[in-house]
Image: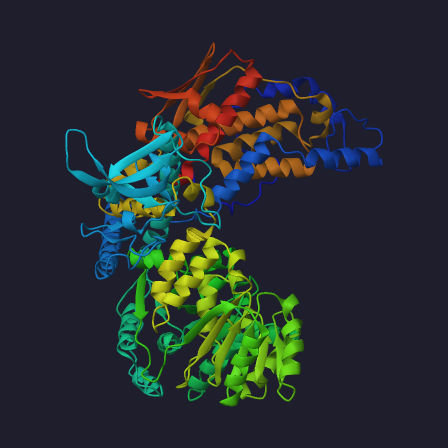
Amino acid sequence: MASFSPNTPHLKLTSTSAAPPRLWGWTSLFTAHKQAKKKQSFQFKAVYTPGLSLSSPTSKKPTQRREKNENETDDISILNERIRRDFGKREATRPVMDSEEADKYIQLVKEQQQKGLQKLKGKKSGGGGAGAGAGDSGYNGAGGFSYKVDPYSLRSGDYVVHKKVGIGKFVGIKFDVQKDSTVPIEYVFIEYADGMAKLPVKQASRMLYRYNLPNETKRPRTLSKLSDTTAWERRKTKGKVAIQKMVVDLMELYLHRLKQKRPPYPKNPAIAEFAAQFPYEPTPDQKKAFIDVERDLTERETPMDRLICGDVGFGKTEVALRAIFCVVSAGKQAMVLAPTIVLAKQHFDVVSERFSMYPDIKVGLLSRFQSKAEKEEHLDMIKHGHLNIIVGTHSLLGSRVVYNNLGLLVVDEEQRFGVKQKEKIASFKISVDVLTLSATPIPRTLYLALTGFRDASLISTPPPERLPIKTHLSAFSKEKVISAIKYELDRGGQVFYVLPRIKGLEEPMDFLQQAFPGVDIAIAHGQQYSRQLEETMEKFAQGVIKILICTNIVESGLDIQNANTIIVQDVQQFGLAQLYQLRGRVGRADKEAHAYLFYPDKSLLSDQALERLAALEECRELGQGFQLAEKDMGIRGFGTIFGEQQTGDVGNVGVDLFFEMLFESLSKFVSFPFRLQVDEHCVISVPYKSVQIDININPRLPSEYINHLENPMEMVNEAEKAAEQDIWCLMQFTESLRRQYGKEPYSMEILLKKLYVRRMAADIGITKIYASGKMVGMKTNMNKKVFKMMIDSMTSEVHRNSLTFEGDQIKAELLLELPREQLLNWIFQCLAELYASLPALIKY
């Protein structure tokens, strides 16, 4: 198949000495104007504007019309944007992987997945997964992971999904007598759109899933019908197609990463000396994590991609420091990426202190605290390899930061970064060793860890001196706040006071200054001047400031030993992972720590907010960040899994069934040889020139437009050559043409569409397109399964319902015989719909 490259250079609309390809009769379009064209010479680049006089090129009116035309949205622009969105993220420069080689790597992935299954098998039922309720899901004992719901955990009014029937509302469980029997048994009663269904509890436990969505709303758009399951089957098919796209993208990423090679790092005896500087006795889990990371770096030839999941204060940073030492001592650079400036500064201080005994290893911090001159100096040092360890925020991912020899990326709290930053991080994982630190991983990271597609080390053993944090959840009152702060100040401690918005920080400042007149109180948030924020945090760390009123800027990693009380106001506006991180800011010393979570009024809270709070209270013990993330996974639903919102796809079937379908698809994918996967899911492209379009359409261009083209014949040659190369070249040719000459007239649009139709047909594997009366036929090499997957992906119901597959033909019966130009438009739109489903299909 043609390579889809978003990086193909723009075509220049210039002449070429190459022989022109077949032009589908375009030559005749220009014959009448050839002589006139030779006599004309334009000193400016005019823009074609239909219906306007050419005598006043400097008038304002044509400019206004031109802007209007250029901003119009037509079929070609819509297709270009869709291709850029759906195909742009796929890396076109990936080397081809043959089937034998791919089978070898898929076997490695399968071994990884079995490790993930063993982790799940070790959990008691209900201990993990994406289920929202306790006891909902767990390892099913048969080599898979079940997200099915325990009927006894349901409450009246809960929405459920039956795998074969669809979405209904749980009514209750009661005894009833079967036909031809006198023995009553328990039945689950479920309400559907057209009636009530009952099924035995045993059967329900095998077929029912809790219905959750990735947003606050748990109510489905509509209940399914018992009498007609076609709508449900359509929704389920959409979910399957979405999963297929995700699985293929995931497999491509991991197969490509596994194929990357880098020499294992040498086992440096100096690591023992470096480790000896650690002032604490490592916990058993920490020791295991040290060994895991060391093996990844020194024994494997593929880049590391490991998640270190440990509760706050459990020693994840030390694992990262030892990995950094291993990489830097081998002459490579290491990057430490933090979500906030405050945390980046703290990491910089810790790293600088640990590497202070090694004068040859230079540590640098890149942040907005620095002056322009300091930044430029650091960027130059990074580029020339004079900085070995670089610490900073997302600015480290910017295009201006050029690394000399980057070997390791350490990412702290990946869930705090935006979508663009996450995609940039993902791009590093292909060729650089990556270590991700998190106490509450984002659902995507957690899911991949559990299914074995990503290595994970869990640090669940608390340091010996750590005590559990005592959590208090109640309605807000100033008296409770003052009492909590007084208790902490009386024992010589400090207090975090966290609010969700900057706007509300002044209000507690006023009443706390009145309640504690002699106490230093300060405000901190991300919009303060850099120096001011830095000084405030420094004074709080030194114990000068006793009460810090702040936003969630302190959420990640901040380590203040003497701060052992945190107050969170308007707790309902925080996510579960945020609350867990905030609570972890305290309790790092040997004193009992307190977290006070205040809400305005429980009656104002959404069901999801109440679930978050209940989950947080359940996880009061130490080392439960990983379990909490599993709860968070169910409550927040799909979230930002796989890098972007897929709310619509998940909403079709609900979170739990979607996850089970995804898990089954991943398991199935690694269970069969690669060749079978390709044969089953791929499209086989055909050469562009081999595609026949038997539709006689040759519209004539307006002479006014031809006169504006610098060299019409060569322009046509360039267009045909662009289409022959690949879809990206054709897109960029079209966009360059429009930038230079404005929106083309309708006849030129038809000619461009003919090129697009031939290009898309070649990529999809269609060798011939013809029309006979009301019937349109397309001869193709694809199999029926691929065709079904493609039409299931189509968003246009009109096109989807009109297409059938017979032998080696895709056929469409139109309602009436269309004029040739309208027919070409219909074929263009139909192929565009089919083409959009290509990301769901493997292309090796």
Is residue 687 visible in the rendered image? The answer is no
Depth check, front residue: 456 or 224: 224
The reply, left or right, for residue 34 in relation to residue 402 is right
Vertical comparison of 415 with 315: above or below: above
Number of numbered tags placed on the structure image: 0
The residue most toward the front is 182
Is residue 107 visible in the rendered image? The answer is yes
- Which quarter of the rendering shows the N terminus? top left
- Which quarter of the rendering shows the C terminus? top left
Residue 229: where, in percent of width, then height?
35, 29
Vertical comparison of 616 with 561: above or below: above
Depth check, front residue: 314 or 2: 314
Residue 772: where, in percent of width, then height?
45, 11
Vertical comparison of 792 with 248: above or below: above
Residue 675: where, in percent of width, then height?
25, 40
Depth check, front residue: 387 or 478: 478
The reply, left or right, for residue 450 in relation to residue 611 is left
The reply, left or right, for residue 384 in relation to residue 314 is right
Residue 737: where, in percent of width, then height?
64, 35
The reply, left or right, for residue 174 in relation to residue 741 is left
Depth check, front residue: 737 or 156: 156
Q: Quadrant of residue 456?
A: bottom left
Vertical comparison of 30 with 413: above or below: above
